[in-house]
Each structure stands twice: as C-alpha cells, then as structure tokens.
Image (cartoon, rainbow, N blue to C red):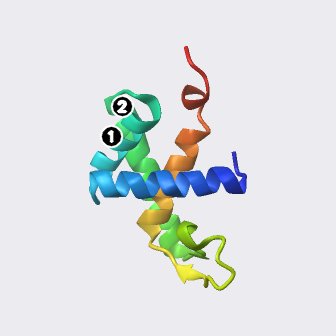
Amino acid sequence: MNSDFIIQMAEHFAARVRLEAGTNSGEQVRRAWRLAFARNPTENEINGTLEFLEAQTQQFTAKPVETIPVTNRFDPKAKMVKREPSELALANLCQLLLSSNEFLYID
C-alpha cells in the first residue's frame, strides 16, 4: 500500500487523470473512478472524495513537500523540487484508489 512501486504507480495514475480531466477536481474524481473501478462514482463518493482532496491540499499547502518527480525518480542527478499541493493531493487519492478493496478484488 505504501511501497515505492504503489506510490510511483499512483503518481503515474494521477498524471493521467490530470491529463485527461484537466484541473477541475470534480472531473478528476469522476475520471479516476472510471479508470480504477470501471464505473461512475456515486454523489456520496464524489462529495467525500472532494472533501479528501481539499483536506490534503490544505495539508500540503501548510507543509510544502519537496520530492523527486516520478518521471525522474531513477535519475541519479535528479533534484528535489517543490510540488504543487493539489498535485500531491491527487496522487494521494490515486494511491488510495489503487489500495482499495474494490480495485483489488473482483465481485
């Protein structure tokens, strides 16, 4: 759930969601749900997820994080860069979705 591989995949997943859904959080949530679960989220899921994204964004705004971007992770010369709070929040959401039971198990 917190392995380097899952974190890396979550960052790739978040990059795809941003590319396909743009910067609108609601559209990002809908796109992430469709990609992860092959279904649309319910209104309760959308609302809860938007609250999660807002809380994470506020946390990363209060305590900025510097990391090596996923695309440069294995480059020995890669430098730490300050990441956008909303970008980190979306990566956290994608990590959560990839670790969920609905993603891991087929009903």
> Label 2 is placed on what type of residue?
Pro
Image location (x, y in percent) of residue 73: 63, 70
* Residue under the image location 35 percent in, 38 percent down: 46
Establish if 104 lies above or below 54.
above
* Residue under the image location 65 percent in, 85 percent down: 77
From the viewer's perspective, tell me whether residue 100 is left or right of residue 3.
left
From the viewer's perspective, tell me whether residue 3 is left or right of residue 36.
right
Q: Do the residues labelled 1 and 2 touch (CB within 8 Å)?
A: yes
Give the structural element (helix, strand or loop) at label 2. Answer: loop
Measured Cα–Cα span from mark 1 to mark 2:
6 Å
> Label 1 is placed on what type of residue?
Arg
Give the structural element (helix, strand or loop) at label 1. Answer: helix
- Most foreground residue, 34 or 41: 34
Residue at the spot of label 1: 30
For disc 1, the neighbor class at 10 Å (few under 14, some 14 to 19, many from 20) is some
Residue at the spot of label 2: 41
Residue pushed farthest right?
3
Instruction: Name the quarter where the N terminus is drawn.
Output: top right
Instruction: Name the quarter where the C terminus is drawn.
Output: top right
